[in-house]
Amino acid sequence: MPKLRRNLLFGLFGVALLLAGLVAGVAIAPAVRATTQPAFTESFPLLQEIYQTITQNYYTPVDSSKLVQGAIDGMTGALNDPYTVYYTPTEYQQFTQQVNGQYAGIGAELDQVAQGVEVMTVFGGTPAAKAGVETGDIFLKVNGKSVATWSADAVANAVRGNAGTKVTIVFKRGQGQYTATLTRALITIPTATAQMLPHGIGLITLSQFSQDAASAFASAMQRLAPHHPRAYILDLRNNPGGYVDQAVGIAQDIIPQGKVATLVGKNYPAQVYSSSSGKSLGVPLVVLVNGGTASAAEILSAAIVQNHEGTLMGTQTFGKGIAQQVMPMQQGGYLKITIAQWMTPNGSNIEHKGIAPSYIVTGTQAPLAAAQARLGGTPSMNATVKVGSLWLTADGQQDALGHAPALQAGQLYLSETAVEQATGALVTYQTSSRTFTVNLGTHTLTAKLGSAQASLDGKAVKIVAPQSIGGAPMLPVQDLTQAFHVQSRSMGSGSYRLTTTY
């Protein structure tokens, strides 16, 4: 399955913020205030009575502010909506910094892998870069606590802190480990980056839809313009969303005429966002997405594809089809509340569904390689694996594997993770049915453990049977060759070069 990156900015997926008015740079709701409902009027005396009874009779002193916070959390929690939350003034300030790409930390992006939590990216000039932290390092301890079994979000929370404070981290690198003590600093993640790839392809990466996203995108386009790109790749992988108006602003630079999104809610009149700018890139466009592409990033993705201005490649997006506004409370603090759902140009809502790309490809390097191939660049990607090794190299980047490649009866076998990282194929394995489903591009292979009978795009085929090796279900590379034109060549000493043509 595709991996979801977390950066040390926040573990906040899919924040789509509407902009009706601005206070301190965060979306504020229109003048629709809460109305008193009869049920609440009848229940409020009971709530007040319970509060008074607890504060007067509980056997130890009670912090009344915690009781109030608990009541607030209970009300928002009863909605079963993770995006509706109350912020204290301090939490609100942190939220605004986060959604605009600022945080106090070490300056690294991390990911959940089989071995634990791995460093995926180190941003230049940050504490992590200065300490020599590298891509592929695995978190072992944070301030003396073992984090080997923690989630990526939990590790990120442990590493974050106030600027100027220190954090000591033990990393695993290869077969060894090292300790680094870093001083946290205020980190600003660039909203958009731009670079020219070979064969005249311009790459723009959007990390989030912060308040400057539309202008950052325009600036990125201007930086690429002197190189006269003949095609573009817009990378929205792991983009958690942000401000709706910024997604609309970028869409207006890509879509000459058409709907972008429609938002509607109980107290939010239907609002159609559209483009009539007449602007178009004028050249082919591929948009890269994955399971971390959420909310405003999904709004832009759907608008581009459904207005026929580009092609989606990658894996299913996160699936967040609702939008929030942040409302200041008269008694203090702020309530971020879901007030609307949004529809794609064709009238679909993607909540809990996501958007399916027309060309499936996953892994770290493969999506970019496949996009370049689609646009007339290099048509393949090379990866190197070694029997017995827990490391793989794909297009020059090293990735950790949970299970080492194995050689059995002259056949090279790869685990699910190894197949994904080496080829870009999306692999799922159902333990109950002992069945692999492998997707790459527009093709699907379904194979059962121990069986030489399989299905390729719905047609019966004979394959080399997948096997359980060392307790892990594994696929023969020969099956990938048969289904997806993955070529394998022995390099000697147990090493193999895999070449996947897209």
Image (cartoon, rainbow, N blue to C red):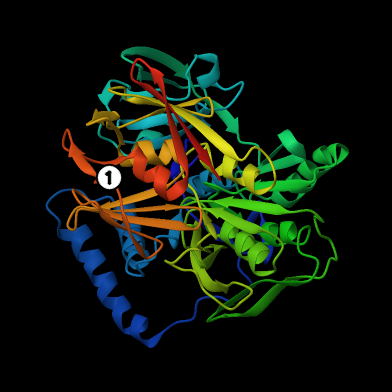
Residue toward you, 432 or 38: 432
Instruction: Please tell me which residue is depicted at 58% across the width and 78% down the height of the picture.
Output: 347
Residue positioned 54% across, 47% down in the render: 237
Number of marks in the image?
1
Q: Outermost residue, right direction?
A: 226
- Quarter of the C terminus within the rendering: top right
> From where the camera sits, is residue 197 visible?
no
With respect to residue 247, does 196 lie above or below?
Answer: above
Left or right, residue 312 beside residue 383: right
Circle 1: is it few (<14), some (14-19), or many (20+) Cα within 10 Å?
some
Residue 17 position, x and y percent, is 59, 60
Q: Picture quarter containing residue 152?
A: top left
Going 73% across and 41% down the picture, which residue do you hit?
201
Q: Is mark 1 on a helix, strand or loop?
A: loop
Considering every residue shown, the one lying at the far left of the view is: 59
| Residue closer to the observer: 317 or 216 | 317
**Which quadrant would residue 455 be assigned to in this image?**
bottom left
Report the front residue among 394 and 129: 394
Residue linked to disc 1: 464
Residue 211 position in % (x across, y down): 68, 50
**From the viewer's perspective, is residue 405 above or below residue 171?**
below
Drawn side of residue 496 relative to residue 70, left or right? right
Residue 93 in view of the camera: yes
Residue drawn at (36%, 36%) of the image: 418
- Give the residue type at disc 1: Val
Up-down relation of residue 43 to residue 338 (above or below): below
* Residue 67 image offset from top left, x and y in percent: 29, 57
Could you say which is closer to the camera, residue 403 or residue 147? 403
